[in-house]
Amino acid sequence: MIAFRVLAPLCLASLALAGTTQCNTGSAKCCDSTQTATEAENSGLLSSVGLNLGDVTGLLGVNCDPLDILALGASCNANQEPVCCTGNTFGGLVTVGCSPININT
């Protein structure tokens, strides 16, 4: 029983770390939504934070919070999307260079 109490948390921690391989070049985030650069430009989101369409690669994460993938049971809220973002955050609202990740593995 003592071995179970010691090994179980270690196994859970290793499962949490396994999800990090999906985001090994950026930071994991939970975003309220993601948009393509064209969608963001059409909605005025890019201009509101001073970005040009040519400055954007990948998806834009909108209103993102950091995802602590080392925390046990780490997940996004039901209405948020888990993404890996390699770019900067602009105006505290838009993060560039995002791609979807699966945190339920």
Image (tube, rainbow, N blue to C red):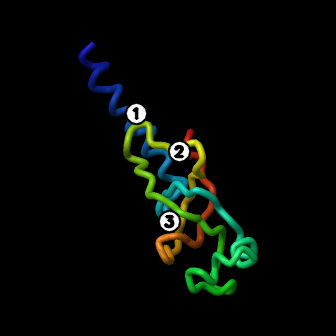
Q: Are marks 1 and 2 in contact (CB under 8 Å)?
A: no
Of the residues shown, which amino acid type is indicated by label 3? Answer: Thr
Q: Residue at position x 33%, y 30% from top?
A: 9
> Residue 35 appears at what percent x and percent y?
68, 66
Q: Is residue 66 above or below residue 40?
A: above
- Which part of the image, by quadrant, shows the C terminus? top right
Q: Is residue 73 above or below residue 48?
A: above
Q: Residue at position x 39%, y 32% from top?
A: 11
Q: Residues within 10 Å of mark 3 (few under 14, many from 20)?
A: few
- Outermost residue to the top: 1
The span from disc 3 to disc 2 (Cα, nearest Å) is 23 Å
Q: Residue at position x 59%, y 65% from top?
A: 61
Name the residue carrying label 3.
25
Discs 1/2, front: 2
Q: Tell me the quarter of the picture where residue 94 sits.
A: bottom right
In the picture, the disc for residue 12 is 1
Helix, strand or loop under label 1:
helix
Q: Residue at position x 33%, y 33% from top?
A: 10
Instruction: Answer with left or right where residue 98 lies relative to residue 26.
Output: right
Helix, strand or loop under label 2:
loop
The span from disc 3 to disc 1 (Cα, nearest Å) is 23 Å
Of the residues shown, which amino acid type is indicated by label 2? Answer: Asn
Discs 3/2, front: 2
> Residue 24 appears at what percent x and percent y?
49, 60
- Looking at the image, tell me whether mark 3 or mark 2 is earlier in sequence order: 3
Name the residue carrying label 2.
77
The span from disc 1 to disc 2 (Cα, nearest Å) is 20 Å
Q: Is residue 53 above or below residue 101?
A: below
Of the residues shown, which amino acid type is indicated by label 1? Answer: Leu
Instruction: Answer with left or right where residue 12 lies relative to residue 43.
Output: left
